[in-house]
Amino acid sequence: MTSTPLWWTLREIARLERGGYGPEALRPARLTEPDHERWHRVRRKLGWVAFIELLHEDLAEPFPTAFALDRWSEPPTTALDERAALALIDEAVRPDDADRLAFLRNACRGLGLMDGGNIAALPKVQTHQRVLELPGCGGRIAAHQVITNTGLSFHEHFTFVADSDAERVAIGLAAAELRANPPTIITQAELRARRPSFDHVFGIKGYPQAEQLASDLGLEVRWA
């Protein structure tokens, strides 16, 4: 179950309701409300799948990359039954004291992306520079740079290459953890066609799609 993007977006919703590592909670407790009392008062005939959809809809405007379910290539609730939905909810509200980077590393591991790499050893990005993050990183490199380097913007300084729901959701989770504007994401096909220039290209060694893309385009990559 932890390999599904929906599992991780629900975990992120719980973190946002609790405040996480941001200055305050972004939403009143709905997912994390004890016994879901408010939902039981208003739900009428609606079930737990509808509850999950409404929770995501509530965050789709500020953080569409992770929470706008209609943007996913495979709608995650179409085949979800009520028992599975409730199991996801019960898992999502479990305690989570991971810091931002640890949470994103765990999410990447769960989503089959790269959870390793010495990302702290990569060059420090300057505010006048623009960076391309290759597939498989899940926004972890950019998140580390933004957290550790004052003045950097997740939205303005980084462009992400992603083709799968898992990759896009991981990047969206990073945006939510950082309380950032929606990130700039391009597909591999768009990168191959447009060939934009960047001051740095970062990736994590071991992700086949990233290594193949770098080889095909002759990119000078700094690998973590």
Image: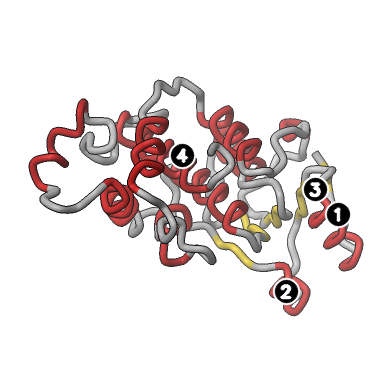
Q: Which residue is drawn at 15% across and 53% down?
A: 45
Near mark 4 (Cα within 10 A), the count class, few <14, some 14-19 or many ≥20, is many
Mark 2 touches mark 4? (CB < 8 Å): no
Residue 82 at x, y = what percent? 33, 46
Asked whether 141 or 75 is in front, the reply is 75
Residue of label 3: 207
Any mark on residue 189, and which? 2
User: Image quarter for residue 148?
Assistant: top right
Say which label, 3 or 4, has the lower sequence index.
4
**How far separated are the C-alphas under marks 3 and 4?**
24 Å
Query: What kind of element bears circle 3?
Result: loop
Say which label, 3 or 2, has the lower sequence index.
2
Q: In this view, does 136 lie to the left or right of 94?
A: right
Query: What kind of element bears circle 2?
Result: helix
Residue 25 at x, y = what percent? 29, 34
Mark 1 touches mark 4? (CB < 8 Å): no
Residue of label 4: 177
Residue type at mark 1: give it. Answer: Glu
* The C terminus, quarter of image: top right
Say which label, 1 or 2, has the lower sequence index.
2
Say which label, 2 or 4, has the lower sequence index.
4
**How far separated are the C-alphas under marks 1 and 4?**
27 Å
Q: Is residue 178 left or right of residue 112?
A: left
Mark 3 touches mark 1? (CB < 8 Å): yes
